[in-house]
Image (cartoon, coloured by chain):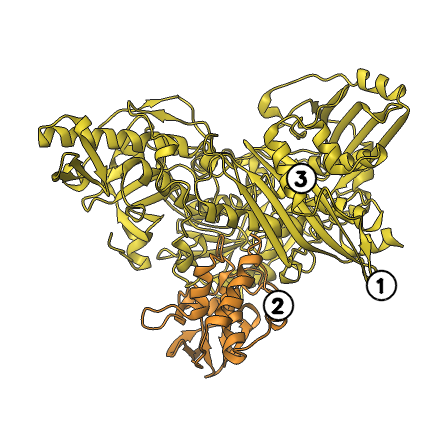
Chain colours: A yellow, B orange
Amino acid sequence: MNILLLNRRNFLQTQVALVVGASGAVIVTDAAAQAAAPALLGPPPTALDTWIRIAADGSVVANFGKMDCGQGLDLAIAQIVAEELDVALDKVNVTMGDTRLSPNQGGGSASTGLRTGAIPLRNAAAEARRVLVEAAAMKLGVEAVCLSVENGRVFLMSDSAKSITYAELIGGKDFSTTLEWNKEIGNSMNVKGIAKPKDPSQYKIVGKGFKRKDIALKVSGKVHYTAHIRPDNLLHARSVRPPVAGAQPLSVDDASIAHIKGAKSFLKDGFVAVVAETEWNAVRASRSLKVKWSDVPGPFTGGEENVYEYIRQATPTASNAIPMFGGKKAWDDKPTLAALASSAKVLEADYECPFQSHARIGPSCGVVDVRGDKVEIWADTQKPHFLRMGIAKFLGLPPENVQVKWMHGAGSYGRSDADEAPYEAALLSQAFARPVRMQWSREEGTAWDPKAPAAIITMKAGLDANNQVNGWLFKAKGFNGWDVRFTGESPEHVLVGMLTGHKKWNAYNFNVPEESYKFNNHVHWWETVPPYLQEASPMRTAHLRAPQEMQTRFGQECFIDEVAHAAGLHPVDFRLKHLQDPREIEVVKVAAERMGWPNCAKGTATDDVYTGWGLALNAGYGSFAAVACEVEVNKQTGRIWVKKVSIAHDCGMIVNPIGLRATLEGQIMQGISRALHEEVHFDEKCVKSVDWTTYRIANLNDVPSEVDIVLINRPDKPIGGAGEPAIVCFPAAIANAVFNATGIRIRRYPLVAERVKKALA
Amino acid sequence: MPTYKLNVDGVVRDVVAEKDEPLLYVLTDALKLKGPRYGCGVGQCGTCTVMVSGQPMRSCVLRASLVGNKPIRTLDGLEKNGQLHPVQVAFVDEQAAQCGYCANGWVMHAVALLEKYPKATDAQIQQNLANVQCRCGTQIAILRAVKKARDNMTITKA
């Protein structure tokens, strides 16, 4: 396929889709698909043409309703589509996240990119192949069963000279074939045709390792990120935040920015912003603008020193036995408490988990062009269809007038700040009747994004006289995982919405671990606590990669080790004794063996460092991960270095082992980062984490000297999620390793050097 | 606003910029380059890095008005005759990017280091690149890529 690189002006002025796929970045005009786009929530899932199109040159466009957050998801989708269609991989281009082109598969969410997201693409591609083979049979005057396909060419098996290509059959035209849609919108959307997808035993492309083509573009400055979109007549914007969270602007002094050419202020209810003709002048204006703020008490009572006391004392806002996605479920802790009362030995521990920031490497950016009642949005949102609904509502326009085009952006990893700037740009574009580019500052990206909720995990266990577990209690009590919703589908879920009078919703969620271990008299539940500040808080909470799982598994997997020691068993043996699922048993065994189990030595020490290893397990997203870490703890400084990491990972059928390995390597470093460094600092008035010195993340000095990833492939099992299961394990695996090395149990992450040093003293 | 002449990737460009305007905004806003990007604005992450007279500089905290006629090299100009720079090739080989937003900082720092010290040790690489930030956690692959670039490269000073 020709690579057609248009200049930015053309790119913006023509209605085109940026296609980033297996064959690299190409820009394809697809007027037909756009004209056919229905009014609401993307194109109809019932049309095969929504999912698969064959271009005039025989290349394939697969319209995917999710987007790549940096793990090369589009390549895996291309592999699946190429496999079913019997075309070469580099003939498939995957479009993502354009509300005109993409079916609403829910966007980036819950590691569903492949495990649910690939299913309708697989079915649609299989159906497209069936339709094409039928059409070829008609043309060639033979029965379809006599035909086969290779590289997009349908041929007679008994005489391969008799053939016709996909391009000749349908290139550039519609399939006009109907699919059966399961009437679901979002992650569970599925479609089916008459065709049955291939049996995995026939796979030639799925399961093989391929490298991403977009990386060459990303390392050479050829990718359009949202930040690069600059339509003609653009205004640059910056917002202005209060010095004390919750303070309201009483007035702005326009004289304070009169010296900055073209700069204008904007004030609506609680939202203050500036616009200017150049980006630097917008920055200058945001720094110069004098705002009179209302005098309010600092909302974060006691600041960060008090956070765990705040959680302990708080009256719960809600509680449940399971995450709310599964509905309300009651629990009863009485049998457990009664069992504990009769135990020979009772163990109790509280584990403390911090607020963490998404802190995207590039803070939120959105470019919006409101022209009368029509709106164009460029954003690196994870969920374009929901952003479209929300901004339409915010501007008082019908959603069919609003289009969102997903762009590459800084890694988002959950309900980050990604949806914030696009909303703000939309409001300003409507007000100034010009396209607006809103760029958040570093300070906003770290201090004002939605945070992973701080929590305390309370664990209790009883052992009988024979050291058998006779009671097990898990309680998570923390800030709300749903303080703002997991999509930007309505204005109250973003700052500017709350600041302009959209009242926040009231819904509550947290998490409990999978019940991997079989214990008698076990009980699990969660409780949420009220937010410090109800509306427009910089400490509003939502999901960060693996929603509330790192917190809950930190408690569970550390306590497993503690109880194992109390029962006189090696933590690995203790796990194996209580695990039920053979896939969990296998990942634990494999990861442990890589660290020398069962012949493993105890922790060791030299004059300078303690050395030890620990393990943690996580099951979720249809996948299983065990992570083992060997750590060195510096005796003088308390600094932890994760020297070796072994991951045993089972996500069912593997689509692309190269991509999977890269995804896991990413989780190693982000996992180490969250386990050792990341915590949001704040005082009573505001968030103090505003940059990379006040919000530390892992750097090259944290890279392990040995990384050992074992991929367990199960082609007979469904594809599981791979973006989250492993990262969850890191704080627990590292804390368990620190105990093994030093004999000291640290029940709080991040395990920053100072905290470790204090614990060692 | 004052006008300046900037030597960017071998081409002298006339730009209009405020006296206190950081080079980053001139490169991205006026010259529409896509390599250097805003990440922190305080010189901590490296996402905005360019080379000025061969030295890696954080363009978000470097005033354009102070650059004078010193040659500026950017990610946008690394490719020569359709060939990626060996550092870029190594990043592709090792698939050393996830979202790729920070890639500019890593590539530019690695190019600056390896063009000056083609035989940089592992420790020197680690030390030189330790103050570049990646949020996706791609450091393992990045380190492999930079070492591979060193091993593969026959450096000729650009």
Outermost residue, front side: A599
Q: Secondary structure at mark 2?
A: helix
Gap between marks 1 and 2 measured at Cα: 25 Å
Element at badge 1?
A: loop
**Quarter occupied by residue A592:** top right
Mark yes or no: residue A527 visible.
no
Discs 3/1, front: 1
Question: In the image, is residue A756 above or below residue A396?
Answer: below
Q: Is residue A468 toward the left or the right of residue A326 in the image?
A: right
Type of the residue with mark 2: Gln
Point out residue A423 in the picture as x, y percentages from the top left corner: 49, 43
Residue picked out by circle 2:
B126
Q: Amino acid at mark 1?
A: Asp
Q: Disc 2 and disc 3: Cα gap in Å?
A: 29 Å
The chain under label 1 reads A
Q: Residues within 10 Å of mark 1 (few under 14, many from 20)?
A: few
In the picture, the quarter occupied by the C terminus of chain A is: bottom right
Q: For the residues carrying marks 2 and 3, which lies nearer the camera in this image?
A: 2
Image quarter for residue A177?
top left
Q: Quadrant of residue A184?
A: top left
**Residue A550 numbered tag:** 3
**Side of A119 relative to B59 (left or right):** left
Residue B156 in sight: yes
Location of mark 1 (residue): A607
Q: Residue at x 38, y 68 (%)?
A: B84
Foreground residue among A3 and A246: A3
Residue at mark 1 shares a chain with residue at mark 2: no
Which is closer to the viewer, label 1 or label 2?
A: 1
- Is disc 3 in the same subunit as disc 1? yes
